[in-house]
Amino acid sequence: MDELRVKRMKEKMLAGNIDILFLRLPENIMYLTGYWPVIGASALYFPLEGDPVLFAPEDETPFVEEGWEKNVRYYKYFNVAALSNPNRDISDLYRKEGLHTAGKTVGYEGSFECVACNHVRAETRVATVSTYKMLEQIMPDAKLVDATSTIIAARAIKTPTEIEKLRLACEVTAFGYRNAKAMIKPGVKETEIGMAVENAIHIQGIGYKGIKRSQGFAFVMAGENSVNAWRPFVFSTDYRVKAGETALLEVDAYVDGYFVDLTRTYAITEPTKEQQEVWKVIHAAVDAALKAIKPGVRAADVDGAASQVIKDAGLFQYRKHHLGHGIGFQFHDPKPTLLPVSEDILEEGMTFAVEPALYIPGIGGLRHEENVVVTKDGCELLSVLEGDL
């Protein structure tokens, strides 16, 4: 049991005057139980005082047992007598449990519009109005409040156990990059490079240091495609890379429910003089950001340190997005976010990506993304991937 994160959540609940959390999202259930739901059909009753109760499909018993919560009530997800309906079945189990919420304030996940993918990534189940209506029915005398900000605040500070999981996810991501780097040459498709990354993360990751679930999502953009790599909807194409170009490889990967986000840029052959000059600026921006990170510093000031390097080089017009974002329970954890208007203050234990980038027509899109953890007097790299341009 990760007692630190359970304690932290209860501290945040107390500060927010929340007596009970009722959670449906796998990322939040995993945070408080160590069990990462597979199909998103589980729920957790988590009181400030008293014992939690986990509700889960009986099909997922082996996964539940990997966590620390032993007070579990199972139901049949697949049922020949009726269509699957987790809210219906969880409601029945809840009522049988005889839990009392009269006069209590119950927090739910009301504003999680961006959620982590399921392990079964073809579908992601989310809490909607139907979940809220279920809570109204089974807790008619409770005060229901949106606990999203409370949950995010607790998740933002990682425990030593969580930090080691993220290190492990970075190690596995490196398998994919090394596989890709070995095959990058003129004539290879972006999709071929991307699949080389994803295959290595899946094949080499599962079983490595006890990992049960590991997958990667690779986005490869070469040549002029890389100039548009700032967009949030980029994907690999059948474009064949050419000599003199760069290939930008972004990889989101997870290990047993812990998510990291890394990017490297590779020259297909020898980089041009212009590419090398831009690359020096990007690395100087990375260094400036890393030097600025420490507890008590504004996230906006870390962004500012990297931005100043790019401005001094006369290239700021080619910067298209923020400097970084949280990692951990999503590829883009909400807190902290590194951009000029951010109000986040860095704290020891926060984990996030630092990704300065420039997207210049005729030269290419170049980005370098590291994952870091804030330490008591600075920061430390979680990434273990060597080499790039």
Image (cartoon, rainbow, N blue to C red):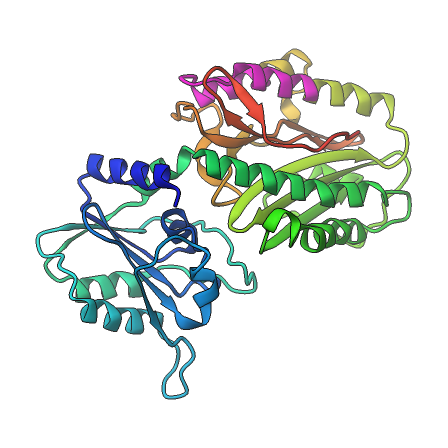
On screen, residue 336 above or below 255: above
Count of marks overlaid on the render: 0
On screen, residue 380 above or below 198: above
- Residue 286 is a magenta residue: yes
Magenta span: 283-306
Rendered residue at 15%/66% (across/down):
98
Q: Is residue 221 left or right of residue 166?
A: right
Quarter assignment of residue 120: bottom right
> What is the x, y in percent for residue 384?
67, 32
Give the overall secondary structure of the magenta segment.
helix
Query: Considering depth in this image, is 153 or 309 the residue closer to the camera?
Result: 153
Q: Is residue 275 left or right of residue 139?
A: right
Residue 154 visible in the current orientation: yes
Rendered residue at 43%/34% (across/down):
159
> What is the x, y in percent for residue 31?
40, 47
On screen, residue 75 above or below 113: below
Query: Considering depth in this image, is 230 or 171 the residue closer to the camera?
Result: 171
> Image quadrant for the C terminus?
top right
> What is the x, y in percent for residue 270?
90, 29
Query: Considering depth in this image, is 15 or 336 the residue closer to the camera?
Result: 15
- Residue 287 is a magenta residue: yes
Residue 236 visible in the current orientation: no
Question: Given the current orientation, which residue lies at the most extreme bottom position?
Answer: 81
Q: Is residue 157 left or right of residue 178?
A: left
> What is the x, y in percent for residue 343?
38, 25
Q: Is residue 75 left or right of residue 308?
A: left
